Image: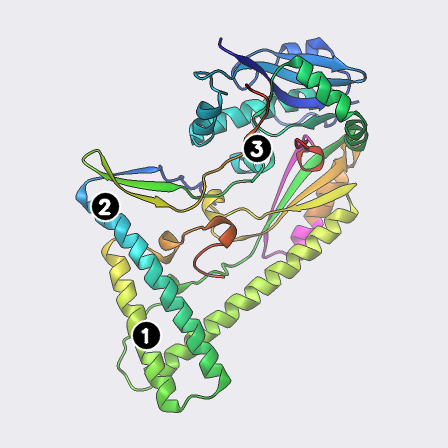
């Protein structure tokens, strides 16, 4: 019993749509900005937690 | 026709100019937030009708001058309002409704 | 390879090895079946050791690397898609790793009844995505307005009037977009077995010049796809100033994705 009819190859799902569905928290455009000068980290601006979704268990 | 937006890299590496630009952006964002809050409050006060004509005019002039000054400041680094917008995740977008 | 784990892609109705044989997983690994009763877990063996891509620290780093994340998401989806074309399949979220196949079988046993119900629900059905974009922006539009010269008498009050008009226009646009989104979703839900509203996507991610007002997911029987598309076309005509995007058919992600309990 098939789920879907033949779909056009090359009609790629947008990455945003994929991540919305595959990540627990969905997509948030944000991140930590580290401002550095001459290779020295000076200021770390934490705007928001980065995309995170780890469902892992019993890996030890 | 829409174009996909490039996601910013996490590390902003600098020469002095870009350090200045990023700090500038942060400062302008905070100022822009305050400007918008003040504008909203001003409009509310005007709506409530408890201000005299002179007060309304003075308030409008002050906000107009602030708006002009901010536009000029943004212009120095080629920043639009959209550029300043920070997404705070669950707290919602910082600027705008 | 160091310490290994079983990466879960999907749980499906019985499916043959020939379907799985052509699929490759997130680490390029071959995909295989772990069978228990009438369910099949679609699994790949991945490295969860300290240096492995799925070790705790490395995985956290990788998930924050957009390039890695994109490749992993597409590979993950390709496996699910490959299976879903053959049999009903319930997708797992990205990076669901279990210690070993015994752990996999254990979960199949624990989740059995719920899974069976889920698979029955999506059998012969696919997810379609309908997005609606508002005709105009409803954020602050300060850049669009030319800033007039201060100082002229009456210019302060005039400025406030203009800002007030802009604020009202914004509120009206937002209210209209919200109403349209509700109407469109309600209409589409009538033509689907199930319907869900997902969070609208940030303009900066989609690159759209106007905000998204509806991000809907609809579960539609395979033989109902044409009728669904016709419904969307009708809505497009009715709300001609909005932009509609129809995409699919996709595996039923929004309706049966498994979360760890």
Percent from the top left, x then y, of residue C78?
60, 22
Is disc 2 placed on a helix, strand or loop? helix
Quadrant housing the C terminus of chain C: top right
Identify which residue, C35 or B61, lies in the foreground: C35
x, y percentage for residue C59?
A: 47, 25
> Which chain does the numbered disc 2 sit on?
B
Q: State whether discs 3 and 2 lie on one chain.
A: no
Residue identifier under label 3:
A13
In the rendered view, tell whether residue C145 sits above or below residue C197. Answer: below
**Distance between mark 1 and mark 3 Cα atoms:** 46 Å
Task: Identify which residue is drawn at 76% across, 42% down.
Answer: C194
Callout 3: SS: loop
Q: Is residue C160 visible?
A: yes
Letter of the chain that mark 1 sits on in the rendering: B
**Mark 1 sits on what residue?**
B64
Q: Quadrant of residue C83?
A: top right
x and y, in percent, of residue B29 in the image: 34, 57
The part of the chain drawn in magenta is: C234-251
Residue drawn 68% across the image and 47% down it: C233
Identify the residue under disc 2: B19
Q: CA distance from mark 2 to mark 1?
A: 30 Å
Of the image marks 2 and 1, the number of the one nearer the N terminus: 2
Secondary structure category for the residue under label 1 = helix
Q: Nearer the viewer, mark 2 or mark 1?
A: 2
Residue at the (28%, 58%) spot, across then down: B74
Is C140 a magenta residue?
A: no
Residue B79 located left or right of residue B82: left
Tell me: residue C159, above or below residue C243.
below
Bin the neighbour count of mark 1 within 10 Å (Cα to Cα): few under 14, some 14-19, many 20 and up.
Answer: many
As drawn, is C65 to the left or to the right of C178?
left
Asked if residue C211 lies left or right of residue C93, the reply is left
User: Is C122 above or below relative to C38?
Assistant: below
């Amino acid at each position: 019993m098939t789920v879907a009819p033949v779909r056009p190859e090359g009609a790629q799902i947008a990455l945003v749509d994929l991540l919305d569905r595959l990540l627990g928290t969905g997509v948030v455009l944000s991140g930590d900005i580290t401002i550095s000068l001459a290779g020295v980290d000076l200021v770390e601006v934490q705007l928001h937690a980065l995309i995170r979704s780890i469902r892992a268990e019993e890996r030890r | 026709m829409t174009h996909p937006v490039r996601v910013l890299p996490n590390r902003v590496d600098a020469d002095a100019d870009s350090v200045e630009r990023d700090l500038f952006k942060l400062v302008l964002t905070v100022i822009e937030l305050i400007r918008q809050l003040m504008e909203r409050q001003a409009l509310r006060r005007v709506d409530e009708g408890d201000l005299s004509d002179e007060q309304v005019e003075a308030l409008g002039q002050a906000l107009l001058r602030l708006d002009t000054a901010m536009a000029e400041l943004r212009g120095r680094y080629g920043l639009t309002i959209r550029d300043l917008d920070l997404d705070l995740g669950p707290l919602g977008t910082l600027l705008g409704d | 390879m160091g310490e290994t784990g079983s990466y879960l892609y999907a749980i499906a109705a019985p499916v043959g090895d020939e379907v799985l044989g052509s699929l490759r997983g997130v680490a390029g690994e071959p995909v295989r079946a772990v069978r228990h009763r009438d369910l099949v877990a679609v699994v790949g063996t991945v490295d969860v050791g300290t240096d492995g891509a799925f070790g705790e620290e490395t995985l956290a780093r990788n998930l924050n690397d957009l390039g890695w994340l994109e490749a992993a998401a597409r590979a993950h989806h390709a496996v699910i898609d490959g299976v879903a074309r053959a049999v009903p399949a319930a997708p797992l979220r990205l990076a669901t790793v279990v210690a070993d196949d015994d752990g996999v079988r254990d979960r199949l046993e624990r989740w059995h009844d719920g899974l069976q119900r889920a698979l029955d629900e999506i059998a012969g059905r696919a997810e379609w995505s309908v997005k609606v974009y508002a005709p105009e922006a409803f954020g602050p539009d300060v850049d669009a307005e030319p800033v007039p010269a201060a100082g002229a008498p009456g210019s302060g009050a005039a400025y406030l009037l203009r800002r007030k008009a802009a604020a009202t226009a914004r509120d009206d646009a937002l209210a209209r977009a919200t109403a349209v989104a509700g109407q469109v979703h309600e209409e589409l839900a009538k033509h689907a077995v199930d319907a869900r509203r997902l969070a609208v996507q940030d303009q900066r991610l989609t690159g759209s010049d106007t905000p998204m007002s509806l991000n809907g997911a609809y579960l539609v029987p395979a033989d109902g796809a044409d009728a669904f598309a016709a419904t969307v076309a009708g809505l497009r005509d009715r709300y001609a100033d909005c932009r509609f995007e129809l995409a699919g058919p996709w595996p039923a992600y929004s309706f049966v994705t498994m979360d760890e309990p």
